[in-house]
Each structure stands twice: as structure tokens, then as C-alpha cells.
Image (cartoon, rainbow, N blue to C red):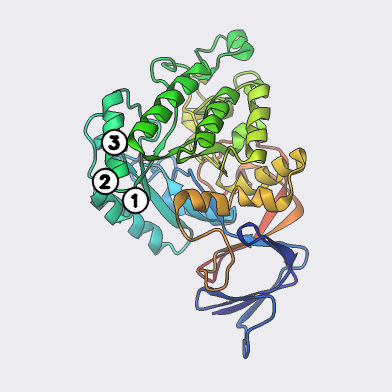
Amino acid sequence: MKIWIKNGRLIDPKNGIDAQLDVFIAAGKIVAVGPAPAGFQANRTLDASGLIVCPGLVDLSARLREPGFEHKATLESEMDAAVAGGVTSLVCPPDTDPPLDEPGLVEMLKHRAKSLNLARVYPLGALTQKLEGERLTEMAELQDAGCIAFSQADAPLVDTLALLRALQYAATFDFSVWLRPQDTFLAKDGVAHDGEVASRLGLPAIPVCAETIALAKIIDLARVAGAKVHLCRLSSRAGMLLVKQAKAEGLPLTCDVSAHHVHLSEMDIGYFDTNCHMVPPLRSQRDREALCEGLRDGTIDAICSDHAPVDDDAKIRPFGESEAGATGLELLLPLTLKWADRSGVPLVQALARITSCPAAVLGVDAGHLTPGQRADLCLFDPNRYWRVERDSLRSQGKNTPFLGLELAGKVRYTLVDGHVVYEG
């Protein structure tokens, strides 16, 4: 299939391109940007007038809920949601049932995902067996099976010696370890930020120090072990400042923030809106503003969707008993555009946070439109508004705090390996 994408505004952050240029695709790869190659005859032409053509989005956290949680979502529904949101590469955490702690499970997931011919899936392997925080997994075997890095997801790892051993093992093979910083004991049974809203509603709280204490421990151990560490979903100003100091020291740390935490704060819980029950919790407006500034100055490397579809029955319970999580794959692009518009961030810089920067965190050759690169692209209309409604979401999980909101940025086409996998 030969495709000619014409008349679009091409934005490629990695290559510093923001201009009206055509893209030519053949045999699943980008063969030219700008003038057509000699003798190029397109089988299909996509008129991108009024659209932005950019690399396919790279999402660093999307729970696909398979295996084990098919009542919440299926691989088919979530992969469909991914391409509808312009996401062509995504990372799935290991907290499935059973966890991704054996090569056979990883190979099965990779095979199932590949057979759908939609987005690329990069599994995180479990750092410890059954995510119990005790015995380390066979990381080398899991990497051979297709794992991109290793993580505990949201499962606790309270044994500091076990964490040090895991980081040392990972450093030996140059593996990356992904950790969400939260002290288990300080966060025990908490469901909201330790602030005025939790106090008013009588909700058990999680203090900011639950994040900073865990961060200090992780940073010190990473320094000792010499390991590459990615910090998942920062939520506080104090935590971001610790990361900034560690990066200034030269430690090989990266970090991300969820799109929800860029826009929402504890105030959005309102009267027990369970769609705002998230992990980590939505924090103060001051924290939210600091996270936005961290994205601007590069302290925070990427924005992720933190996609976590939940079934309706788990969300209609009282706030403290409801299941945490929100759907986000289809909202990653418009929420990033909304942040950029509100913060005065150039579009090239904003798109870098969901394309080339997360690809660099992953260490994969994606997130750019260099000739010879696999043709994974997203074409979207930045001026087209759409209303977030249950029926408009392809994800099986309809749980999002943004229901009813109109957002700018509608994906028109998503291409993976040079094939149009979504038209909207």
C-alpha cells in the first residue's frame, strides 16, 4: 500500500519540523517527507487540509485488563480505543491476573496484541514474582519474551533490601526499572489527598510525604545500584523538586505525569465523584500548577493517559470503597492540547511530551517521522471540538471525570505500519 498524505501541517518534534509538508508511505515505512520520490504512485491519498500530521502517540501507562480482568475491558476494546485516540505505541503494566511474571504470559499477550493489527504493545514485566515484593523474577527471560522494562505497578515493595537487589540486578543487564513512589504505610487505606477536601468529606487521606519519602528512598538506592529508573505518575510539587535535584546530579532518572493530574485537583472530587478516585490521588491546586511547570521546563519527561478502565459496578460504590482509575487513551491528545493552550506552550513542545519524549523513555525507535522509519502517524483536527460522552468512548471503561466536557482535538486518521487503522 502506497499512501500520499498531502496539504497537512507536519509537526515532528524530534526532527524540529513544523511546516506544511507532504508525507509519502510505501511498504509500511515513510519513504519521503516533502517532495514525492521519483515514480511514486499512490494507491490512496489522504487530504490533510486543516489537519496536523504528527508521529503516532506513545502512551507510557495503559492497562488493557487482559488477562484476568475481562469484565473491566478486553484487549480488543482497549486497542480500538488506543487507535481512536491516535495512540500507536503503548506500555501495559504487569498487574494482570496472573501478573506478567512468566515468559509464556508475556508471549501470549504480545501474540494477541499483534494479531489485532492495531497499536504496538510494550509489556512491563513484573519485578518480583506474583508482584508480592519478595523473590525477583527472571528478568532476562522476560526481556527475551518481549518485556521493555520491569515494574511493581501499584503493588507494594516494602522490603528495602529486595528493592536494592532488584535495582542491582537490573543495572547488571542495563534494564530499566519503573516504580511508582508511594510509602505503603503512610498511604494505607487512603483514597484522597491530605487536604481540606478529604477533611470536609471525611475521607482517609494520603499525605504528600508518602510520595517524597518513597522518592528519597528510590533515588538513594538508584544512586547506589547505578540503575536506570523511571518514576511513574508524579503527583506533588515536593516530589517533582526531588526529581529535579536528582536529575541535576546526573542520575539516570526519567518521570511522567498522568493527564488527569495536569488538569484536576482535589477540588474536583466535589461531592464524592468516584470518577476522581485515582492512584495517586488528585492533589492540591498548587501541586497541579507545579506539575504543569515541570512539564514546561522538562523536569517531567512525558504525559501518560494512565488508562485504567473500571466496570460501572466498581464505580457506583461509596467513594472510599470504589475502585480507583479512569479511562484515558482517547483523551490523551485533547488533554495535552488543552494543557498547551492554557499554559502557552508551543504545539511542537506539547506534542513532544506524548511522542518523542516517551519513546526516548522506552528506548524504542518511535515518535518521529524520519524517512525509513515505520509509518506510525496520527492526523488530527486541532480545532474540532467533541463532547466526551459514554457513547463516544470506544473503551469498555466509561469512567472519566471529563464526561460532558467539550474538548478540542479530534483524531481523523491513525496509521500503523503504513495501514489506516482508524478513520474518524
Image height of 185 relative to 97, above or below: above
Spatial separation of the CA atoms under disc 2 and disc 3: 10 Å
Spatial separation of the CA atoms under disc 1 and disc 2: 9 Å
Q: Mark 2: which amino acid? A: Met
The x, y position of residue 7, in whole percent, is 75, 71
Q: Which of labels 2 and 3 is toward the front?
A: 3
Q: Nearer the viewer, residue 301 or 223?
A: 223
Q: Mark 1: which amino acid? A: Cys
Q: Secondary structure at mark 3?
A: helix
Q: Residue furthest bottom?
A: 39
User: Which residue lies under the disc numbered 2?
Assistant: 139
Q: Earlier in the sequence, mark 3 or mark 1?
A: 1
Q: Quadrant of the C terminus?
A: bottom right
Residue found 63% across the figure and 24% down from its top: 287
Residue found 52% across the figure and 69% down from its top: 373
User: Which residue lies under the disc numbered 1?
Assistant: 147
Crowd rating for badge 1 (residues with CA inside 10 Å; few <14, some 14–19, many 20+): many
Q: Quadrant of residue 63?
A: top left
User: Which residue lies under the disc numbered 3?
Assistant: 166
- Residue 401 makes an appearance in the image: no
Crowd rating for badge 3 (residues with CA inside 10 Å; few <14, some 14–19, many 20+): many
Is residue 380 toward the left or the right of residue 242 in the image?
A: right
Q: Mark 3: which amino acid? A: Ala
Is residue 134 toward the left or the right of residue 241 in the image?
A: left
Q: Which of labels 3 and 1 is toward the front?
A: 3
Crowd rating for badge 2 (residues with CA inside 10 Å; few <14, some 14–19, many 20+): many
Q: Earlier in the sequence, mark 1 or mark 2?
A: 2
Image height of 273 relative to 251, above or below: above
